Amino acid sequence: MTVHFPFDNSYATLPDRFYTRQPPTPVSRPGLIRVNERLAQELGLDPEELRAPEGIEVLAGNRVPEGAAPMAQVYAGHQFGGWSPQLGDGRALLLGEILAPSGRYDVQLKGSGPTPYSRMGDGRAWLGPVLREYVVSEAMHALGLPTTRALAAVTTGETVFRERRYPGAVLTRIAKSHIRVGTFQFFAARQDEEALAALTDHVIARHYPQADGPLALLDAVIAAQAKLIAGWMSVGFIHGVMNTDNMSVAGETIDYGPCAFMDTYHPDRVFSSIDQFGRYAYARQPEIAVWNLAQFATSLLPLIDADHNAAIEKATESVHRFPALYAEAWLARFRAKLGLTSVEEDDAALIQALLDRMAQGQADFANTFRALGTPAARDQFVDPAAYDSWATVLEARLARDPASAEESAGLRARSNPAIIPRNHRIEEAIQAALAGDLSPFHALTEALQTPFEAQGDYARPPTEDEAVTQTFCGT
């Protein structure tokens, strides 16, 4: 059975210094874990073709489909604030771009073997991070947040060595593109204005056709990131490694490494084992986004204005718009979570007062918001009286809102997920898969496709023995 991808590879028309062309490295015994049937159909692909032996070979990197242009993309980036002049796809290859009914998408194999940018790595991925990214990225999509997605996952039949031996796997990732802030930084650091201009034109044509030039592109990316980060905050998501090479200019969540959803709320929550100083803690994500966007703006300076000082002034003005854009998006998300349809000046203080009480009362983030308007909300707090005093203020605010009680309750139900991809559930699925049982992974993935519906035991926070307090990159 021939696997057909409707490739139309625009990035491959950019100059050779944007990438290195190479095929994936074949694996010994590819085996199917899962094909995302819903996504395949949305992309105009045939899920049965992907499940067939030839399709599995494509997903593993053993066969390059007709029309593909496999390449490793080059980029640079600031990693935990430190400058890395050359990074790039060290364990992934872009197969190409497909034209789907809903637009243009990258098809990337993650874990497809070494590239010139592997920096002495093996270019492979092990099963755990592949399952984690599959679960979390698809959960993010179901929550309505912009994200890369998982089309399929396969095993390789080979061993990957990290701190010990693990089974290898490959993820097929779908994205609007894999162009990063770090892609622009790579060429800006080399003062390659020709490449910067070509990249800018490419991104505008592909993602922001309404943008008239590099300054308008900067404004568009800033607006997209403000909405994205507000979305993360509204569901208690912590990316964990917000380096500039992990910020997509398309406004999607990308690179699910040591990511996590909070159980017990605290603004300083960190899960990533490598984030020792809390640079990417939950509450710091908006300010880190500003820092990253400032690096993007710096890369664009030569294109914004020939007068360097004028370019700095214009770019600075744009970056300074982020806080207001973010605050607007954050308030919209959290007003909906409270069931509010109108705007009052004190709403931000009302929301923050709840969050402060949640932090002090060790309340579960998802379950507290889901229970608002019911007696169960107070049960999330060590001291329920702290919630009760706040709830009276909310009741008064809701009484002034034009929405009916039923309308407010419906808005809360649509805005507060009943289930999220909790760390302990993901870890259970990974450990079961390592023991040969993929059923917990499949069950969790399916449940998270309808996150606003209560299902089984998935809303339960971890017990003390189940709690996962650290996450790892580990691909």
Image (tube, rainbow, N blue to C red):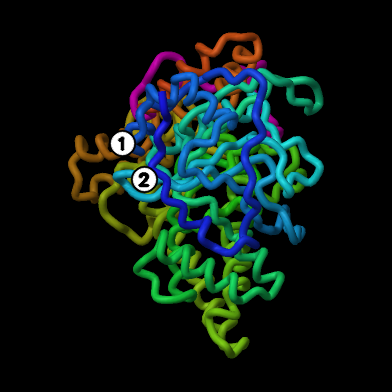
Q: Is residue 67 above or below residue 190?
A: above
- Going from N to C along the chain, the mark reached first, 2 or 1, is 2
Q: Is residue 87 above or below residue 308?
A: above
Task: Please tell me whether the stretch drawn in magenta is mainly helix, strand or loop.
Answer: loop
The x, y position of residue 92, in whole percent, is 63, 41
Query: Of discs 2 and 1, which sits in the foreground?
Result: 1
Image-based side of 131 in relation to 465, left or right: left
* SS at circle 2: helix
The residue stretch that appears in magenta: 451-475
Of residue 279 and residue 388, the one placed in the foreground of this image is 279
As measured in the structure, the alpha-carbon distance from the residue carrying label 2 to the one carrying label 1 is: 22 Å
Which residue is under mark 2?
393
129 in the magenta segment: no
Of residue 225 and residue 202, the one placed in the foreground of this image is 202
Q: Residue at x 46, y 57 (%)?
A: 10
Which residue is under mark 1?
414
